[in-house]
Each structure stands twice: as C-alpha cells, then as structure tokens.
Amino acid sequence: MNIGVFDSGLGGLTIFKELLKTLPQYDYIYLGDNARVPYGGRSPAVIYEFTRQAVDFLLKKDCQLVILACNTASTNALRRLQQEYLPARYPDRRVLGIVLPSVEAVTENNARRVGIIATWATVNSGSFVREIKKINEEIEVLQQAGPLLVPFIEEGETSGPFLEAILRRYLTPLVDANIDSLILGCTHYELIKEAVKKIAGPAVWVVSEGEVVAAKLKKYLARHQVIDKKLGKEGKRQYFVTDYSQRYHDLVKLFLDDHFSAGQKLELVTI
Ligand code: DGL
C-alpha cells in the first residue's frame, strides 16, 4: 500500500520533497488539487468537503496513510476526517496533519514569542495558537494572514522586489513585536523561505515544516509497526493533479529537482 500526500496545489511538494529525502524507500502518491487552489480564503465547510474528496481519492488508490501536506486542510478538515469520516468509511486507514510537528519544534526549542504566518483559513481556525498553548500557555503567539503569497508562489514568483514588498507588510508587525521564532504555517511558504529570513532578520528562527514533518513521520512509522508493515517499499511514485498544463509540469520539476525524473508522468484526474 501507498503513503498519500495531499495539498491544495504545489505547496505540499515542499513537504513531499523532505519525505522523499528522509524516507525514500516507501511508495507514494502525490495529489495536488490545483484546479481549486487556493483553499486559504474559503470557508471551513468548503475546505472540509474538498479535502474529503481528495482523501477519498487517495484511499481508493490504496493509500494506508494520507498526510495532509497543507496547513489549511490540516486545520480545517483533519479533526472531522479522523473523528467522523474514517471511522465510518475506512476504520483501518490513517490521515495525519502537519500542524503538531512544527508546534512541537518551537516548544522544544524553548520559544517565548512565536509568530505564525499562514492563510486566512488557518489563522481563523486558531489551531496553531491552541496547540502551542496546550503545551505551554506562557508562550505568546502572534498570527498574521498572508493571503497574497500563495498566488505569487503558484506563479513561480519566489524572490524579487514585489514579493519582498508584500512580505515586509506581513512580517513587520511580527518583527516589531520581537518574535523569536516564526512558523511558516503554509506549505507554500517554504519556497520563499530565503526572502522571509532576509526580512525577519537573524534573531528570528524560521521553522521549516518539511524537515520536522519528515522526522516525525519516521518516528511514527517506527512506533506503528502494523501500519508500516502494510506499506510498499519499492520506491514507487505517482503524481496526480486536478488541472494539467505544461507550466504546472515544469513547476513540479522546478520544486522537486532531481526527485522528479524526466520520464515521470503527471496525471490529470477528477476527484
Ligand atoms: N498550501 C496550503 C497550506 O499549507 C494553502 C494554500 C491554499 O491557500 O490553498 O496552507
């Protein structure tokens, strides 16, 4: 069986790349719902429904485990999928999100004042604040939505003066409040990490979700042998998208580098 990795678009590839580096032996299916990206400005009900359709597609493709490599989906759909959908439809399968690994990373690093930059839907869910406070309620958490960033990144605009001007507007309130750590709470933002670091300055630790998620998944699989035994380990990869264009194909190649070979197909699906 496979490990499924889902994102609303390209952003999840930043998580996927780290999974391929850390756990290359497994068989994976990546699904990007690029026909409907961005999810970040939508309502929780719509985000749940889109995510449920994506997860259903991956479970039917024989995924034992699905990673929601999208904070917007993790914060707006994960709990309901785990509590209602899976028990009723696929009781032996698992769906995991990506919020907890970065929350644990900052609390383990003794952060005192944490900034979160994410989509509107993630900010409005309050999930990051809740999860950090559950571990240590003295940590101060400041949130900032960055709604213009995902469309920029999906266009391949990952550096330059326009991007920096937008970033400065979003990050200045957090930097002025003296945050010591910044969680890039949207998988797309990993692609602009260098620009973020430049504006946040050397005193702010910028957390990479991909690396922490991959490390946590490795530990999870070691702890859950029943699941691990079911997973195929032939290094197979399949890629599905809900909208296809040559531009999208080229962007996938750009973001995954050598992990996306010349002959690798990107298949168009309806979910
Ligand atoms: N990549 C998604 C996330 O991590 C959001 C992008 C979108 O708005 O669809 O939040």
Image: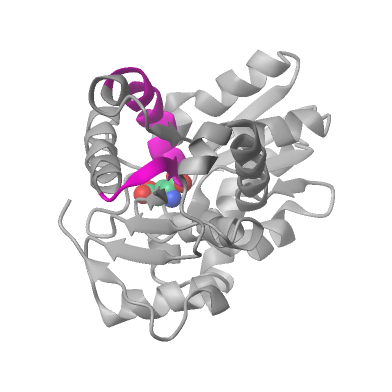
Rendered location of residue 137, percent (x, y)? 71, 13
Frontmost residue, 11 versus 42: 11
Q: Residue furthest left?
A: 270
- Picture coordinates of residue 203, whole percent (x, y): 84, 47
Please give the name of the residue rendered at 40% of the width and 23% of the height, measured from the top-left corner: 79
Judging depth in this view, the residue of 106 and 59 nearest the camera is 59
Task: Pick the residue in front: 144 or 46.
Answer: 46
Left or right position of 74 against 178: left
Q: Position of residue 91 (x, y in %)?
A: 33, 24
Residue 65 in view, yes or no = yes
Magenta range:
61-84
In reply to whether residue 208 is colored magenta, the answer given is no
Q: Can the viewer see residue 120? A: no
Q: How is the image coloured?
A: one colour
* Residue drawn where x is 76% and y is 15% of the image: 138
Q: Position of residue 174 (x, y in %)?
A: 67, 39
Q: How many marks?
A: 0
Q: Is residue 8 left or right of residue 214?
A: left
Residue nearest the observer in this picture, 88 or 194: 88
Q: Is residue 189 left or right of residue 108?
A: left
Q: Residue furthest bottom?
A: 262
Position of residue 100 in the picture relative to residue 28 (left or right): right
Q: Is residue 199 above or below residue 268?
A: above
Q: Residue at x 65, y 31 (%)?
A: 103
Q: Reply yes or no: does residue 82 show up in magenta.
A: yes
